[in-house]
Image: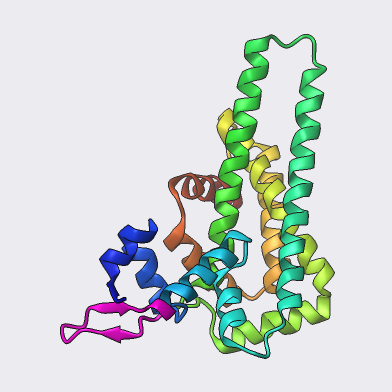
Amino acid sequence: MKLKIGELARATGLTIRTLRHYDAVGLLRPSQRTEAEHRLYSQTDLARLLQIQSLKALGLNLSDIRGLLDDPQQSPERIIERHIQLIERQLSEHTRLLGRLRQLKDLQQMSGAELLEVIRMTEDIKQKVDQMMDVARSVGDRSDDPLDAEQTAYLKERAETVGRERIGEVENAWPELMAAVLVEMERGTDPQDPKVKALAERWQGLVAEFTGGRQDIKANLNTAYQRRMPPEMQAMWDYISQAMKS
């Protein structure tokens, strides 16, 4: 069986754009092409696509999936351990959210309508933060990696120097910080308000700690993020940038 890219997209529910991206990053390259250079996917390609989608459903990023499928030296245990850490972070975030909702339940002075509105806003912010974190994680999946070899090597060396545990703490701090920024933005708080400026200083501190203060790495990562930002993330970016300017 040979399928063209449009036929494969319709049969699987994936988009043509996704399949082309898988091809571009070397994750799923069609076995054959027609004389007109149309992609043709074989039964073997379909089996690989099933593996890709199964691993993706577990939360692995495209880079790890490619490594797991193509590199016999790649350690499945290491990739699984990283996935365990991701799930643990998500559970921690959900636990904090549950705690906030339980606190709200005990606030007898709030009306039912007010409680519903606060819960809706909390969940809305949680979804936005999840989307933003997905953007941040997906930057490393792109074929046009924003960092050159020297910059990537520097970050790896820094992770070893600072300690991967501390780097993990820095990464885990982002969802809570983003949520705090979104709350102030939703309230209409002026970016020059001391509360927002304190959040901006925290933001800059996390960036500096991750990049080691390297402005070239910061600029390249910023460019990569801006290319992929959803509107909500761009609005938050603009908001916190105003607080950083003064």
Q: Considering depth in this image, is 196 or 11 the residue closer to the camera?
A: 11
Relative to 93, residue 21 above or below: below
Residue 118 percent across, percent down from the top left: 65, 23
Q: Is residue 169 magenta?
A: no
Q: How is the image coloured?
A: rainbow
Q: Is residue 37 magenta?
A: yes
Q: Considering depth in this image, is 127 or 167 the residue closer to the camera?
A: 127
- Residue 14 visible here: no
Residue farthest toward the front in the current orientation of the protein: 1
Q: Considering depth in this image, is 227 or 54 the residue closer to the camera?
A: 54
Looking at the rendering, the stretch of residues picked out in magenta corresponds to: 29-44
Residue in view at x 53 percent, y 51 percent: 237
Quarter of the figure that contains the N terminus:
bottom left
Q: Considering depth in this image, is 39 or 208 the residue closer to the camera?
A: 39
Residue 181 percent across, percent down from the top left: 63, 42
Residue 49 percent across, percent down from the top left: 46, 71
**How many marks are shown on the rendered structure?**
0
Relative to 121, 9 lies left or right: left
Residue in view at x 68 percent, y 17 percent: 115
Residue 202 percent across, percent down from the top left: 72, 53
- Residue 112 visible here: yes
Relative to 169, 218 lies left or right: left
Indicate the quadrant where residue 154 lies. Answer: bottom right
